Image (cartoon, coloured by chain):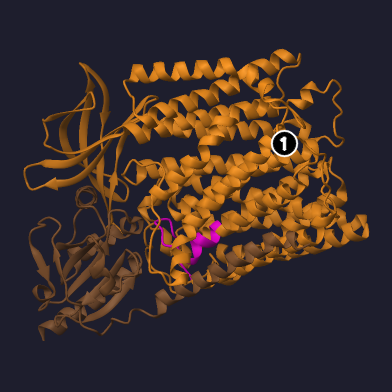
Chain colours: A orange, B brown
Amino acid sequence: MSAELGQIFLILALVLAALLSVLPLVGAQRGNEALMKLAPSLAIGQFVFLAGAFAALAIAFLQHDFTITYVAMHSNLLLPWYYRVTAVWGSHEGSLLLWMLLLGGWTLAVAAFSRSVPRAFTARVLAVMGMISAGFLLFILFTSNPFERILPGPIDGRDLNPLLQDVGMIFHPPLLYMGYVGFAVAFAFAIAGLIGGKVERDWVRWSRPWTLAAWAFLTFGIALGSWWAYYELGWGGWWFWDPVENASFIPWLIGTALIHSQAVTEKRGAFPAWTVLLSIAAFSMSLLGTFLVRSGVLTSVHAFANDPERGLFILAFMGVVTGGALVLYALRAPRIMTGEGFDWVSRESALLLNNVFFTVSAAMVLLGTLYPLIIDFMGWGQISVGPPYFGAMFILLMTPVVLLLPLGPFTRWKRDEFTRILKPLVATAVVSVIAALLVCAWLGTWSLRAVSGWVGGIWLVAGAVTYAVRTSRASRSGLARHQWGMVLAHAGAGVFLIGAAMVEAHTFERDVRIAPGETIEAAGYRFTLHEVALVKGPNWRADEARFSIYRGEREVARMNPQKRFYHRGGQTMTQVALKPGVFRDLYIAMGEELGDSGAWSVRLHVKPFVRWIWGGAVLIGLGGLLAASDRRYRQRQRATQPGGARAEATA
Amino acid sequence: MIRMLIPLAVFLALVGLLIAGLQTAENRKLVQSPLIGKPLPGFSLPGLHDPDTMTGRDDLIGEPFILNVWGSWCWACRAEHPFIERLGREAPIELIGFNWKDERSDALRWLEQFGDAWDRHLVDYEGKVAIDLGVYGAPETFLVDHEGVIRHKHIGPVDANVFQDLMRRAMALNSEAGS
C-alpha cells in the first residue's frame, strides 16, 4: 500500500514542481503579483509530498515489504531497524529520493527566509529550483523508481552491503547531498540574477548565506566520508583520490572559490562574471559528480548499480541545466556591471588569486578523474591516474595559498602596500616558524613533510588569531559573526594541514604474527593479545581478538578487532579496532588465522595527529555555518558603515 | 560576445567527452571481448607466493578455471572481494588470481588482511600478458574451459547477480569437462 502512495506522492510533487518552474517566472516577467505569490505555497506543497514519498519508502523498509524490489534488494529480516531506515538511501534509487527531499527542503527554506528579498526575485529563484526539481523527479520516475514491485515478493531480502552498515554511512550521504543540493540555491540565485538582467550586489549578498551553508555541509559530508573510509575500509588511509571522492571534492573546491568571489562582488562589485560562472560551475560539478557515480563511466568502490541509460539522462539534464545557464550567461554577460578598478596590491587581487588557485585545483582534480576517459577516447590504451599525480599537483597548488592566506584579511580593498600588510604579520611569521621548530624538536621529527606541515599549519592558525586580536582591538563592537566564521575556517585549514602532514610523514604500520598470550612492541607501545573469541551479532558472527595496549607500565587501551562473517550474502568484513586520541590513533585490523596454532596475522598502525584532519575540516565547516548565520546578509539595504574601517576589514 | 561563449564551449567539450565515455561504458557491457571463443594466449608468469616458479599456459590447460584479475591498488577489487571469497569456496573449479601491475609486498599484505580465497596467483608485474588477454581494467573475471578456450568474461566488480551467473557457468564448464 505504502509503495503506491509513495508513487502518487512523487507524481504530485512533480506536478507542483512543474507549476513552480513556470507560474512564478511568468509572474515575475509580467509583474503579476498573484502568480508570484504562488511560489511559496507551491514550494510547501512540493516538500510535503516529497516528505510523504520518503516516509512511504522508509515505512516499507521498516515493515519488510519485500514485494518492493528496492527493499528486497537492500534489506532482510535480520537487519536491525536503524539500518533499515538508513538503507532507504543505501543505493541508487533511494539516495535520489533523499536528494529530492533535501532539494525540496532547500526550496522551502528559500521560500521561508527570503522576506527581505523582493518578491519578483524570490519568484525567479524558486522557479529555477522548481525546474531542477522537475528534472530530477522525471529522472526518478522514469529510470530509477524506488517503488517498483516484484510479485510475488521473496520471503526474505538480500543484505544491505555490510560496508554501508555503519553509523558513518547514516550521516555521510545526507550531509554530502545537503551540500550538493545547496549549491542549487546559489545556482538559482545566479540564474535569477541573469534573467533579471543585472548582477546586483544585493542578490549576491542574499545568496551568500545559502552558499556558505551549502559549502559548510559539503565540508562536513566530505570529512565524514573520509573518516568512514578511514576506519571502515580497514586500511587506515584518509583520502584515496577515488573518482567518487573527487566527485565531491571538485564542487567543494569550486564552492571555496565561490564564497570568496561572492565577497568581492558584494563589497566592490568586482568579478561579477567570476561569481556567476562559479555559481553555475559549483552546481554543475555537483551534477557531474552524480553522473560519474551513477553512470558506470568510471569504476569505483562507491559505484551504485551502474546503468548507462541513467547516465545518459543525467548527462542530458546537465546539458540542459548547465548549457542553458551558460547560453543565458553569454547573452546577458555583456550587460553585467563591472566594478570599480583596483590595484595590483589590493584585497581584490588577493581574492582573484584565490579564485584562480582554487579553480585550477578543481580543474586539475577533474582532469585527473576524467583522464582514463580521455586516454580511452583517444585510443591510447588504458591508464589509471594514481594518488601520486593528485598529491604532487595539490601540494604544488596549495603551497602558495597557505603562504599567502594570512595576508588576505589584512589587505585593504582597492589599493594597498606590501609593507603595510606585512607589518602586523612579521612577528606572527617569526613566532610561527620558531614554534613549529620547537614542536618538531619535541616530537623528534625532522622530515620535510612534517616540518613544513607544522610551519604552514601554525602560520595559518597564528595568522587567523592575529587578525582576530587586531580587528577586535580596532573596533569597539568586536568581530562580526562572518569575521569570526572566517577566522575559524582559516584556523581550521591550519589544523587540517598539521594533521595531514603528520599522518603522511609518520604513520607507523606493521604486519605481525601474534598468538594468544604473546606481546609485541611497536612505536613505543606494547600490544598484548589475550585471546581470540567467537562472538555473535544480529546478522553476523565474528572472531574477536582481545588486546591490551601498554605504554610503559600503564594500560592505555583495550581493543577488540573482529573478523565478521555475514550470514546472508556470505561476506566477510574486517571490523578494525580503533583507539582514537588527540595526538595519535591506535589501530588494529585482523588478517587471517594462521594454521591451527591459534595465531593470527594482525596489522598494527599508529597514526599521529590523524584526528586533526577531521578536526580541521569540522572547524572549516563550523566557520562556514557561523558566517552564514550573520544577520548582515539578510538585510535589504546595503548597510552604510560610516568610518569605513569595519567595512574595509571584512570579506 | 565570443569571449562570453568560452565557458559554453568548454562545457560542450566536456559533455562530448562524457558521451564518448558513456558509449565505451556501454561497449564494455555489450561487446564482451574479441577473445571469447579463442584459446588463451601463451604466457609464462611467476607465482605470487612462489616467485621462482613459472607457470605457463600449458600448465593450466586440462581443467576449467576462473581467472580473476586484481591488484591491491584497485578499490573495486576490494568491493568484489567477498564474492571472490565465495567463488573460491563454492565454485567447483579452480580460482586463479591474476595479480596485475602490483608490488609483491602490497599484494601479499592485501591478501593477509582481506583473505586469500584464490587457489593460486600469477603475477603480471609489467602488464604485458594482460594486454594479450585484452584486460580492460581491474577487476575482470574470465572463465576458461578445459581446452584452454576463453568462454566468458565479466568486466568490473563481481556482485551478487554476477556471482550467481559465474557459479552457473562454472558448473556448466565443470560438467562439460567431466563428460
Q: Residues in magenta?
A: A289-307
Question: Please, what is the dominant secondary structure of the magenta stretch?
Answer: loop
Residue B166 lies, with reference to residue A160, above or below; the image says below
Which residue bears the numbered disc 1? Answer: A348
- Quarter placement of the N terminus of chain B: bottom right
Question: Taking the image as drawn, is residue A144 in sight?
Answer: no
Q: Residues within 10 Å of mark 1 (few under 14, many from 20)?
A: many
- Is residue A33 found left or right of A567 in the rendered image? right
Residue A416, image x and y in percent?
Answer: 73, 27
Residue A313 lies, with reference to residue A458, above or below; the image says below
Residue under the point 53% across and 33% down: A618
Residue A16, by quadrant, is: bottom right
Residue B140, image x and y in percent?
Answer: 30, 68
Residue A370, image x and y in percent?
Answer: 49, 60
- Is residue B129 found left or right of A403 in the rendered image? left
- Is residue A518 found left or right of A147 in the rendered image? left
